[in-house]
Amino acid sequence: MYPAPPPTALRPIHGRAVAASVALALNALVGLTASVVGVQRVALISEFSADPDSVDIAEIEAGDSIAGAVAMVQSVAYVLAIAAFLVWLYRARKNAEPLALWPHRLSTPWLFFGWVVPVVSFWFPKQIMDDIWASSKPGGLHLAPNFGAARRSGLIWAWWLAWLAAVWASKLVSNGFRNPDDLESIRRAVLVDVITDALLVIAAILAAMIVLQISRFQEARRSIAAHQIAAA
């Protein structure tokens, strides 16, 4: 229905996809460790609340120290994952632009600002990823009159819902359980932390799957375009 865009020499993305996937996998692994440590802390606090004599206070303090150390590692892994993901996202977007039949809905700066600007951060990053997916996937824009009408990916939907749930859970911890002053409040805060970590693990795994799939789409399109350019 629409003419195919002319062959364009896309830039390689495999290396950035591997780096982003490894960083996301590392982040998921550290997040899983944090979840396990959190579950152990919840169990200790619950046991202590039921019977203070059954738990040595030093054991609780040791658990707090381990949780603090894991949280520090988790912060570093999180920053590395964000950096690697954004580096990949920029290359994926630049490759997706010549593959599209019309301009993407959001300009390039929103690849970065879309995550931090209030309100729009709840849908801009997904919209950007939807456009990259539709442009990169063979037939992704087939019969669609615009990006808004293109078929959505269930994988992207799952990733985005997991991410939003993790963001809301994190806000609940920071706003609802700030400076807890009793054991039950501490236990609830740690429990919500565990849920947040689990959601972030799911989101990181799904993000890695998206990175690899879009990269496979683009590498295949890059190979075809290179052959077409060479034959022209």
Image (cartoon, rainbow, N blue to C red):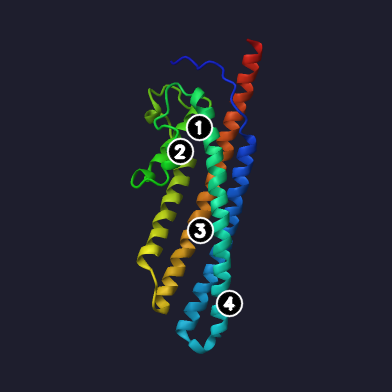
Front: mark 4 or 3:
4
Identify the residue under disc 4: 62
Q: Indicate the position of residue 95 as horizontal and vertical percent values.
A: 54, 28
Question: Looking at the picture, which amino acid does disc 4 mark?
Answer: Ala
User: What residue would you read off at disc 3?
Assistant: 198
Residue that badge 1 annotates:
93
State if disc 4 and disc 1 touch (CB < 8 Å).
no
Question: Of the numbered discs in the image, which one, if any, rests on residue 111?
Answer: 2
Q: Position of residue 101 (x, y in %)?
A: 45, 21
Q: Of marks 4 and 3, which one's residue comes earlier in the chain?
A: 4
Position of 88 relative to 194 (above/below): above
* Disc 3/disc 2 C-alpha distance (Å): 25 Å
Measured from the top left, where is residue 128 in percent x and y?
A: 44, 36
Query: What is the secondary structure assignment of the residue under circle 4?
Result: helix
Amino acid identity at mark 2: Leu
Q: Earlier in the sequence, mark 1 or mark 4?
A: 4
